[in-house]
Amino acid sequence: MKALVYHGPGQKAWQDVPDPAIIDPTDVIVAVDTTTICGTDLHILKGDVPTVTDGRILGHEGVGTITEVGRAVRTLSVGDRVIISCITSCGVCSYCRQQLPAHCLDEEGASGIGWVLGHLIDGTQAEYVRVPFAESSLHRLPAGVSDEAAVMLSDILPTGFEIGVRNGRVKPGDVVAVVGAGPVGLAAMMTAGLYGASRIIAIDLDDNRVEHATDFGATDAVNSGAVEWKDQVLAMTDGLGVDVAIEAVGVPLTFEMATELIRPGGTVANVGVHGRSVELKLQDLWIKDVAITTGLVSATTTPMLLRLVRQGRLTPEKFASHQFPLDRITDAYDTFGRAAETKALKVVINR
Amino acid sequence: MKALVYHGPGQKAWQDVPDPAIIDPTDVIVAVDTTTICGTDLHILKGDVPTVTDGRILGHEGVGTITEVGRAVRTLSVGDRVIISCITSCGVCSYCRQQLPAHCLDEEGASGIGWVLGHLIDGTQAEYVRVPFAESSLHRLPAGVSDEAAVMLSDILPTGFEIGVRNGRVKPGDVVAVVGAGPVGLAAMMTAGLYGASRIIAIDLDDNRVEHATDFGATDAVNSGAVEWKDQVLAMTDGLGVDVAIEAVGVPLTFEMATELIRPGGTVANVGVHGRSVELKLQDLWIKDVAITTGLVSATTTPMLLRLVRQGRLTPEKFASHQFPLDRITDAYDTFGRAAETKALKVVINR
Amino acid sequence: MKALVYHGPGQKAWQDVPDPAIIDPTDVIVAVDTTTICGTDLHILKGDVPTVTDGRILGHEGVGTITEVGRAVRTLSVGDRVIISCITSCGVCSYCRQQLPAHCLDEEGASGIGWVLGHLIDGTQAEYVRVPFAESSLHRLPAGVSDEAAVMLSDILPTGFEIGVRNGRVKPGDVVAVVGAGPVGLAAMMTAGLYGASRIIAIDLDDNRVEHATDFGATDAVNSGAVEWKDQVLAMTDGLGVDVAIEAVGVPLTFEMATELIRPGGTVANVGVHGRSVELKLQDLWIKDVAITTGLVSATTTPMLLRLVRQGRLTPEKFASHQFPLDRITDAYDTFGRAAETKALKVVINR
Amino acid sequence: MKALVYHGPGQKAWQDVPDPAIIDPTDVIVAVDTTTICGTDLHILKGDVPTVTDGRILGHEGVGTITEVGRAVRTLSVGDRVIISCITSCGVCSYCRQQLPAHCLDEEGASGIGWVLGHLIDGTQAEYVRVPFAESSLHRLPAGVSDEAAVMLSDILPTGFEIGVRNGRVKPGDVVAVVGAGPVGLAAMMTAGLYGASRIIAIDLDDNRVEHATDFGATDAVNSGAVEWKDQVLAMTDGLGVDVAIEAVGVPLTFEMATELIRPGGTVANVGVHGRSVELKLQDLWIKDVAITTGLVSATTTPMLLRLVRQGRLTPEKFASHQFPLDRITDAYDTFGRAAETKALKVVINR
């Protein structure tokens, strides 16, 4: 088959590789119908993720059709249309049992991380992919939900919801600020209404992005380039700060912005992937009764989000800014890699 | 009457002052039977709390007997024995209604902080004290609970419980590490069993203190001066870290220790009062699904803790390491100020 | 002034009565701008509520303007526009402190119930009303929210939300069934989206009512007169039942319907006021991991709901089916009393 | 091998049967070292459980040693000492994923119930037992925990904790009443302290049993045969009722007792297995803000309880009132069946 293979920093190729085969009785083989590219894939290509080695097929998002099932698989069948979770869950370790498969202890070749596809084993940017622990890691897709919508349930939408909205403990009536209006920030905005936020404030340096955010659920937009950005946000509260601040960028400055906006008793939910330390002003924060949360998506809410998509309460297909056929995936990478210029949110890649 | 009056950094005096009088109809005057000294009082004396001005009577902890009630007070009467909460709650602002009077918006002369006694108005280290918003800020003391036990419910025990144990989300079976075996750390250890912790590990540099900790509920003791202290703690878990790490010192090093001990999915509850920034290693923590919490006690759990004291399930009188009569309060300060040497935990000062 | 006075079963009059006056320093006098009639008022008139005695001014809902404040009132002023909560909260008893003022222990002339207006003391269906414990029982109304919308926050909307949706523990993705599409059922439907329900199924015997329900947030409507009503509801689930069933009628049959619809692990939230016992089929339910909840509104969520109304996220003015001037309140009673015929939801009565 | 086989109402035999064998790749065979008898086994023998058919080996509790593992089993090995959960969990259905395997949808030959051992497939009262979905249904037993203690973690202790204490939402300081001081009531008493109950009141008709209860964690004992039993219980509260009432008998009278004891805002947790309807006095309860919960144990807390046993914080070996060798299991049934006379709590049966 053909697949997108990583060959060390800066190197990738759409090339011929052997077809995947069932190894363990709990495995399933899926023909990939639709995949997409994550910011993490760009990090890998920069060489930022040394656990990804030369020869690895990339990709941890996808929708497909089952072509083969292992002997121990009871509840999935050849021909089933499925969402491939970005997290592979053994289903039995202590983390999987507590609904935190992000830290699954029993993955193939690794320990303590549930993200294995396109990382520690071959991934979804290929014609076929082997999915271990398939019954715990795939979600059957009902008729009536498009591949385009469904592929957003592999990673981006659960990330915004679980790590931003749910960790942030958003509750009815809350004012929620989201720092960063990129895809994951927008996913948090789209799902903040699930806990009844009264205002959802998009904060970004780019005017286009913040205005665009109102299509994804934001009620207000603030350009953080403006000197008075913080006053603008506080004016949307009772003056004491927001109830929940979601950091969706991953640099020290935006993390600090989130901690400055938070009201006493509020929550800062960090979603951004950080590469270095931040300064935490505990001399100010120790007294404020705040919680700061972090996390890698576990994607345990994918079935719930799928119910909402099916009922038309969520429309994640909006994230699909560009479409490519699978054999033009390198073009898709190019478009996604220049998102500031191409305005790409998620590039959808169809077989 | 006589009172302990602050006169600027390093200066205090046990001196004559006018008796307090009812100002607002919701006020009560309490004759102080027992008081104690908090680490915060020492900070004030060092000049670290500029909002405390020359002439202020110190003290925010106490047990006493009501001598006068304002016209709007319905549920308290002259002669009632009461615990004086360290937090004065107006009972009606949005923070008081959500059980966070630490951030009460309607205090006398201040905004946004419920700690006013011995801070923004005269306090409890005196023969009498005026308590505003008395019905929301005093707790009637049943017969059979000693002053010595009750005075620990003004601040120290609710602080350890609310900011350490409850913010830390301790749950049955958890392994809890408490960094710092001073009074507030011991208060966290004493109350961690209320949520069924399986192990409570005391960590401190002082051998005496950590061993002593087992009298206060700790099941295990680790001296953090040992090179292998972290391995010792991890060996008391499944190897992945503790479920809850409570920071009860207030310096960058101990905060870092807490973040290093925490397992994926765990909680770091900061109780220490910090004077400067700490380095938060988000490059490691972003993925770990941890929560870091902070807070000032609201003392809303005082009635609940009192029930447990009354039933003999908690014995906070253990904190009373020294006893002084009220007119020797400056000696009490001396003893408490040299705690490393005197082994003082809480010095109890009786009229 | 003029007021609507109860004179025993079946007897009421719009008549002259003395103006109310401040009694306690925590009281406030409010000029009633808008009031409405509750189903409970009809029960009182039938003689079903013996604690209401001859001479009582009825009404526990209202919006008005403060004309006088007691000496202990600090945060409210003459001229303030306020929502009058149906529950009067002393703010300091153990139930008020735990946010359950429905069971306030310190009310005027009563014990253990926070509903006193139009019950144990004179109520809001009058030109003026005295409100005890005013700071805990009134909510300042910001500009831009109509009286018509605001009066729904006295009782009906918090009842549907607190006792139906919140007690029912609705969570994102849930399928919620509401048995009974009268005003309180509609209030539950309108607020079920605040916790992200995927489907909200209105169930009623009356075709008009169930269809109407979709204007109030219902996504689906089932006529329970149809033989196959239960199958219709189950077909909107995965076949195992709804996650939350809200009973909003108050008779044994509808309670049983709710318990029949519930899936294992689900919650039946009873909102209806029941006059007699129901048969609880514990032989079936003991194994099902269900919770059955009951409650009287505490109206502690009124400020939160008000934020959502102000932002346009909730539009409770939809409940206002009829309008009357205050001096025609007996006509309003007539219209509301014949709701089946007049299609009245809430009749709004303006000064 | 030998096993205890059910042969229709009133009929059982300790007899030769074929050894069990691996059927599915996720199966394991366990040599039973210790088993015990549940009240449910007596119900089966009376013919109350028609889904148990002639020829079925009884028993759903046990501790043993693995003798064979299926091909898909990765985390368990021959020779491992394990606790056999009374609930068999597929690990992947929606109920198992939400930690409610009591309602597992994918069991062998059944649907919607996780209790299959000794019910729908052969059970643990035998020399060997086949355990399906072994990785989700067995718990590895560390050295230092006795079989006698461990076998109580199959069913009785998690039942008391999950369905009594946890469903009852016991919180620190609560007064908890347990109606019924049989084994499951005692299991609730033993674990109520895990959430910091201030009083745990044992209520039973039998003086021996209630007094005995203080060995299992009860702080107070009330004989419900006394006319004034209810007043005695209320006198242990503030007069308004208990915070949590746990029903651990399973007849209408005891359920009513629980609902009469409950304070406004409290929870009635039903643990008893009921054979007929009860009268629920909604005319009294609708206003009380109570929750009534039911449930079948899911045994998801077994690993947590095991940690507490290992640390000596729980001592379930106290339930072992009698000991029998496996080949005298019919004597064990006789002793357990006459518990009122023999004072049997749990009879421990060792290979």
Image: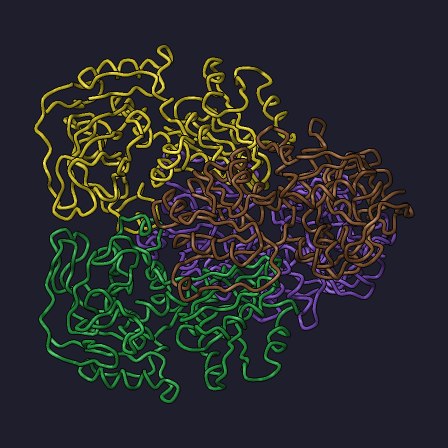
Chain colours: A green, B brown, C purple, D yellow
Nearer the observer, B95 or A253: A253
* Depicted C11 relative to depicted C171: above or below: above
- The quarter in which the C terminus of chain C is drawn is bottom right
Q: Which residue is painted at 55% across and 48% down in the image?
A: B164
| Left or right position of A163 against D61 | right
Nearer the observer, B22 or C180: B22
Query: In x, y percent, where is residue B82?
Result: 75, 37
Query: In x, y percent, where is residue C171?
Result: 44, 56
* Depicted B90 relative to depicted D37: above or below: below
* Depicted C145 relative to depicted D103: above or below: below
Query: In x, y percent, where is residue B302?
Result: 65, 41
Q: Which residue is painted at 34% across and 48% down in the image?
A: B239
Q: Is residue C211 visible?
A: no
- The quarter in which the N terminus of chain C is drawn is bottom right
Q: Is residue B66 visible?
A: yes
Q: Which residue is painted at 80% across and 47% down in the image?
A: B131
Q: Which residue is painted at 25% across and 20% down in the image?
A: D349
Counting the numbered discs, the total is 0
Query: In x, y percent, where is residue C331?
Result: 71, 59
| Left or right position of D207 against B39 | left
Nearer the observer, A323 or A273: A273
Q: Residue furthest top?
A: D341
* Depicted B345 relative to depicted C59: above or below: above
Q: Residue furthest bottom?
A: A341
